[in-house]
Image: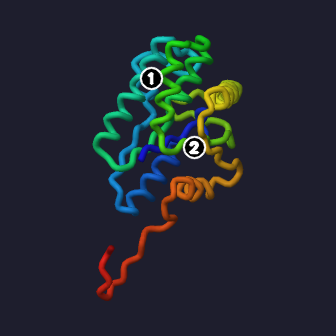
Amino acid sequence: MKIAFIGTHGVGKTTLCFDLAARLKRLDLSVDLVKEVARRCPLPINQETTFDAQAWIFHTQIAEEIDACSRFEAVICDRSVVDNYAYLVHRVGERPEFEDTLRNWVQTYDGLFWVPVWEIPSFDGTRDTSVEFQREIDRILEGLIERFEVPAHRLEAGDRDSWIPAVLRAMGLPLEPPQYSLFGDSPP
């Protein structure tokens, strides 16, 4: 099972990844996170990014997903190829050579969850804090989701506490781990 949280920067995707991983661990699944690869990019990111930087991020995302999926039952991705491509489009425009890969790779996710803009980005040592940049990436992402018919579940703005239960329900997973009796009932 591979799940990705998509969205612009500063909307809480990383926190959601860790929250979901904890819930899936309580369901006795082996879980790995594909953390946001842009943070390790050796080239400029954010508004100063380059074509080469975005190509590195796009392809590294795919490589890390392949690696994680080969070793774990559940993989949670902090971003997907869709939002990685949105940053490339912002900087250098649409690139047809990436689009076939994007179309095919989107089909490898069992669940894509679009995190809405609900607060302004805060500086964390890496993240760009421009509200205009944040909103522009969200707008580009929305266009890509529509254009490529990405089956993304849009999480409801304003009700952050409902997001993890919404993901679990959409994935057909229990909201709570099974309870076992201390008096002799054995796990199934």
Circle 1 Cα neighbour tier, 10 Å, few/some/many (<14 / 14–19 / ≥20): many
Residue drawn at (57%, 43%) of the image: 113
Residue topped by disc 2: 113
- Badge 2, how many Cα within 10 Å: few under 14, some, many 20+? many
> Quick check: 187 left or right of 83?
left
How far across and down, in percent of the image, does residue 149 sit?
A: 63, 32
Q: Can residue 104 be seen by looking at this rendering?
A: yes
Q: Are marks 1 and 2 in contact (CB under 8 Å)?
A: no
Q: Quadrant of residue 91?
A: top right
* Pointer 1 or 2: first along the chain: 1
Vertical placement of residue 102 versus 74, above or below = above
Say what secondary structure mark 1 lies in: helix
Q: Quadrant of residue 183?
A: bottom left
Foreground: 42 or 2? Answer: 2
Q: Amino acid at mark 1?
A: Ile
Residue 55 place in picture, x, y as percent: 46, 17
Is residue 90 positioned above or below 188 on the image? above
| Viewer-closest of 99 and 159 | 99
Q: Is residue 130 visible?
A: no
Residue reaching furthest to the bottom: 183
Q: Residue at x 41, y 47 (%)?
A: 1
Closer to the camera, 89 or 40?
A: 89
Left or right of 85 in this view: 132: right
| Residue under numbered circle 1 | 57
Q: Secondary structure at mark 2?
A: strand
Is the C terminus in the top left, top right, bottom left or bottom right quadrant?
A: bottom left
Q: Amino acid at mark 2?
A: Phe
Q: At which x and y percent is residue 62?
A: 40, 28
The location of residue 102, given as percent across then percent down, is 51, 25
Q: CA distance from mark 1 to mark 2?
A: 20 Å
- Find residue 93 and name its label: none
